[in-house]
Amino acid sequence: MLPRTPCAFDQEFLDDLAYEPEVLLFDELLEIDEAQSLVRCRMPVHADLPLTRSQRAHPVRHPRHVNGGLVIHATGGLGVVHAYYVFGLRYRDGWVGYGTHIHRGVFRRMIVPGPPAEGMCRAVRARKGKTRYFVRYDLELRQNGALCYEGDHSAVWLWVDPNASVPPAFGLE
């Protein structure tokens, strides 16, 4: 059963992540729409984010902002949230995801410390198999309603036997 939104991420989800929860960058699940294959999440934006805290900021030439690499990392977090809540894929059950392509990524404006950003992830195409999902996503990050990043990305989700002794092959060669 899906949680009622908006809500904080539950401990079961946080315990299922392949990384420590602090690198998820999102703190709240705003919406899950299974029919549209969509999730929306809240991202706190503060000056102490990784890379942001290390910027040698200048108010005109280089204002403090969420680094582009961190924005891309955040899109991966959105994919994890989507896989868990929409597809029901669990890391503890052997599922792991890897980004494979950024077909299009456009930075429209900086995300700056202050109001939270909102991330949206929608699967627009998915080939689902027993041990592999290939998924194409539309992604957005907005702050104060303004579009900051829009992307068209792909990822592969693999089921890996927990007893395997070698890492999975992508099978994309």
Image (cartoon, rainbow, N blue to C red):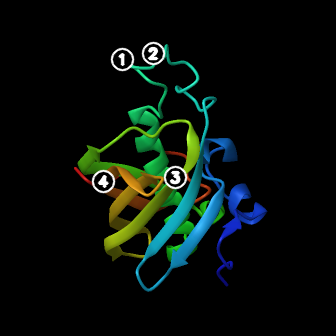
Residue nearest the observer in this picture, 129 or 102: 102
Find the distance from the CA under tag 4 to the CA under tag 2: 28 Å
Select label 3 or label 2 by which is in front.
Answer: 2
The image shows residue 43 at horizontal and vertical percentages of 57, 50
Find the distance from the CA under tag 3 to the CA under tag 2: 29 Å
Q: Is residue 160 visible?
A: no
Instruction: Give the residue drawn at x 38%, y 19%.
Output: 60
Q: Is residue 43 left or right of residue 21?
A: left
* Residue contact at pointers 2 and 1, CB within 8 angstroms: yes
Find the distance from the CA under tag 1 to the CA under tag 3: 30 Å
The image shows residue 15 at horizontal and vertical percentages of 73, 56
Instruction: Give the residue drawn at x 40%, y 81%.
Output: 36
Instruction: Give the residue drawn at x 61%, y 42%.
Output: 23
Hey, which quadrant is residue 111 in on the image?
Answer: top left
Secondary structure beneath disc 1? loop
- State the residue position of label 1: 61
The image shows residue 140 at horizontal and vertical percentages of 38, 57
Compared to residue 36, the image places residue 56 above or below, namely above
Q: Could you classify mark 2 by the number of other residues whose Cα lies within 10 Å: few (under 14), some (14-19), or many (20 or more)? A: few
The residue most toward the right is 11
Q: Could you classify mark 4 by the number of other residues whose Cα lies within 10 Å: few (under 14), some (14-19), or many (20 or more)? A: some
Q: Is residue 68 left or right of residue 4?
A: left
Residue nearest the observer in this picture, 150 or 24: 150
- The amino acid type of the residue labelled 2 equals His
* Residue contact at pointers 4 and 3, CB within 8 angstroms: no
The image shows residue 127 at horizontal and vertical percentages of 31, 74
Tag on residue 151? 4
Compared to residue 108, the image places residue 54 above or below, namely above
Q: Is residue 54 visible?
A: yes
Secondary structure beneath disc 3? helix
Tag on residue 58? 2
